[in-house]
Each structure stands twice: as C-alpha cells, then as structure tokens.
Image (cartoon, rainbow, N blue to C red):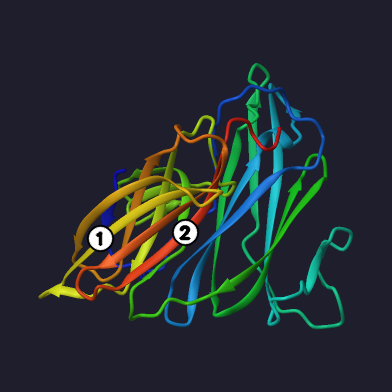
C-alpha cells in the first residue's frame, strides 16, 4: 500500500466545475433499452470551519441503463441530475419526497420545508454505431455543498431526457463539523483512481490530485485496486517551528468481522496540522462479499488516536445485471 502525503492547508475552498468523465469497466453487453435509469449516490464530509462541513456528493450512473437515440452517425443519451438538501430537525422520519408530476420537493405533512437545490448537472454520452456499451460502464459526476451542523435529507433525482424515465435516491445526512482542535479524521472517500496532476482544474481535483469517486463502492471485476482519500485535522506540533508526526494503520474486515488484510504502521511527518492521505491497495485476492476498511491515525506527540471506516464490496459480476 502506497500512501502519498500532501502538506497543503485544507481550509481553502475547493474549485467546482461543470464537467463529467467516463469510467469504463469490463463486461460486454448491447445498447441500453428504454427503462428506469440506474445510479448510485455516496457522500463524504470534510472540514470547512468549526460550524460547517464541506459535503461532497458522488454519482455513478449505469450507461447501460440510459436510452440512446440516433444522432447523425452516432448514438447519444442525455440525462439530468437534480440534487436537493432538505433540513430535517427530527432525523427520525422523512419529511418530504420528490413529486414526479409536480417536479418538485413536497412535504409529507403540512410542515414548511427548507429546501436548498444544488447545481443541476447535465450529462451527454455518445457512442458510434460500431461500439458496444459495457455492462460495467458508468458516468461519474460530483457535486458539493457547505452545510451547517444539523440533520438533513439528501434527495437526488436522475432524469433520462430521452426516455423521460426518472430514478430517485433519498438518504439521511448528519452534518458533524470538525473542531479546530483535537485529532479528527474526515470521511473516507473511495475512488476508482487517484492520479497526480500539475494544476487543479476540475471538480474532481484536490490539492494536486485527480480523484474519480466510486459511489457504488463496488470493486473487483475490472477494478482490482481500491483508492482512498482521507483528511487529517488537529495534529500536535512535535518539533518547532512546525513539524507534525503521526502513524497510520489500516485493516480490512469481512462481513463476519474477521481481519483479512492488515498493514503495518506508516510513520509520517508534515509541516501542517491539517494534512491528507491518498492510498491504494490491492483487493483482487478477496472473494466476493461485503467488507469494511478501517483507518487509524495516531498523533506521535499527544498519543491521541482517531479512526474512520468505510464499507465496500467485491463483486465478480455487476449488481446491475
């Protein structure tokens, strides 16, 4: 496992741009028929300030589930992603839903809603008549929002603009700001790839690296390696003027809780109390199933530890087939 440490300050605002990319998997199939589009949504929370978090929303859309239409000598599909963040003070019951006929968020009762729509994303996909869409092919997109501490509902609507079919994902979100003091870890972002770049120029770029997120959290067939991104906050200075030292450990457990992979300690130093770690590791030797990645960071000055974990699964065949 190769961890790469970046020393830039993590409090600067990230750049957001309207672009999308394709990630290709392995497995052959034909052109998509008219049907309900299929997609996955995942999120990660990062530090913005003491009272708010930077929420990233990741989308993976099955290309095979979209409807293509003839356009000159090519086949094209068009889709739209609508994302809504709804404040929910109870966090126990859903307050609202997306009404397909009214095309808006409506309450489940008479309560007033505080709804924040995020940037609308438009995606266009094109293949030639001689190409085939692979069953594992996905469109990858990303959105973001700065939200204060509290409880929310995240509602994502995917519209196939050719077939007029709609798919909806709705989930709860608890925003938990990261303190300026004390060792803490962000959420773990799982990715299909992380590559070093010269300058940040797209929404997928963080501190000199381009990260293509996996919102389906599925690896194995075609993707034998998992990439991870995690941010570390609140390290204690071990040597003046500003040297911070910490150890990193990681392990993977199967669905029974048994450790199936374990990495020995990595000792690192940084010139910033806010750093991040990019890592990758092979999982092609793991049998199909559900797993959990656990990451632990120990501050070598204070002796404090912080942990984060993320579930993922290994599949030989796509769950969408």
Q: Which residue is rendered at x = 65% and y = 29% of the image?
A: 135
Q: Compared with residue 118, is residue 63 higher up or lower down, i.e. above or below?
A: above
Q: Nearer the viewer, residue 103 or 86?
A: 86
- The image quarter containing residue 320 is top right
Residue 155 image position (x, y, % from top left): 70, 63
Q: Measure how far apart labels 1 and 2 are at the Cα level.
A: 16 Å
**Image point (54%, 79%), residue name:** 148
**Location of the N terminus (image quadrant):** top left
- Judged from the image, the secondary structure of the residue bearing numbered disc 2 is strand
Which residue, as the protein is rendered here, is positioned at the far right?
Answer: 101
Report the disc number at residue 309: 2
- Sooner in the amino-acid sequence: mark 1 or mark 2: 1
- Judged from this view, the residue extending furthest toward the top is 130
Crowding at mark 1 (Cα within 10 Å: few <14, some 14-19, many 20+): some
Q: Secondary structure at mark 1?
A: strand
Left or right for 171, reference 45? right
Residue assigned mark 1: 247
Q: Nearer the viewer, residue 184 or 117?
A: 184
How crowded pointer 2 is (Cα within 10 Å; few <14, some 14-19, many 20+) is rated as: some
From where the camera sits, is residue 19 visible?
Answer: no
Q: Is residue 266 visible?
A: yes
Residue 245 percent across, percent down from the top left: 19, 65
Nearest the camera: 7 or 173?
173
Q: Can you say whether 318 is above or below 140 in the image?
A: above
**Residue 314: assigned label:** none
**In x, y percent, where is residue 222?**
51, 30
- Say which residue appears at 68% left-offset and 82% top-offset: 89
Question: Which residue is nearer to you in this view: 257 or 196?
Answer: 257
């Amino acid at each position: 496992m190769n961890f790469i440490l970046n020393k830039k300050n993590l409090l600067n605002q990230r750049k957001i741009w309207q672009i999308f990319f394709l990630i290709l998997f392995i497995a052959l199939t034909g052109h998509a028929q008219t049907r309900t589009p299929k997609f996955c949504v995942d999120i990660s929370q990062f530090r913005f300030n003491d009272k708010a978090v930077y929420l990233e929303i990741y989308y993976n859309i099955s290309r095979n589930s979209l409807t293509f239409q003839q356009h000159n000598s090519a086949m094209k599909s068009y889709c739209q992603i609508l994302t809504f963040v709804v404040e929910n003070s109870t966090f126990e019951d859903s307050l609202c839903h997306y009404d397909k006929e009214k095309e808006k968020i409506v309450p489940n009762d008479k309560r007033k809603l505080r709804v924040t729509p995020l940037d609308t994303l438009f995606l266009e996909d094109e293949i030639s008549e001689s190409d085939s869409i692979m069953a594992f092919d996905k469109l990858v997109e990303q959105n973001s929002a700065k939200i204060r501490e509290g409880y929310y509902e995240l509602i994502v609507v995917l519209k196939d603009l050719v077939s007029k079919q709609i798919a909806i994902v709705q989930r709860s979100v608890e925003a938990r700001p990261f303190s300026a003091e004390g060792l803490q870890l962000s959420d773990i972002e799982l990715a299909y790839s992380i590559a070093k770049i010269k300058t940040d120029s797209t929404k997928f770029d963080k501190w000199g690296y381009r990260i293509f997120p996996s919102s389906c959290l599925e690896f194995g067939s075609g993707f034998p390696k998992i990439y991870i991104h995690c941010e570390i906050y609140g390290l204690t200075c071990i040597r003046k003027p500003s040297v911070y030292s910490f150890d990193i450990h990681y392990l993977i457990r199967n669905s029974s809780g048994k450790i199936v992979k374990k990495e020995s300690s990595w000792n690192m130093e940084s010139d910033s109390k806010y750093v991040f770690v990019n890592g990758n590791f092979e999982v092609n030797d793991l049998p199909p199933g559900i797993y959990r990645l656990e990451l632990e960071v120990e501050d070598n000055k204070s002796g404090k530890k912080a942990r984060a974990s993320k579930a993922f699964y290994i599949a030989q065949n796509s769950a969408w087939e």
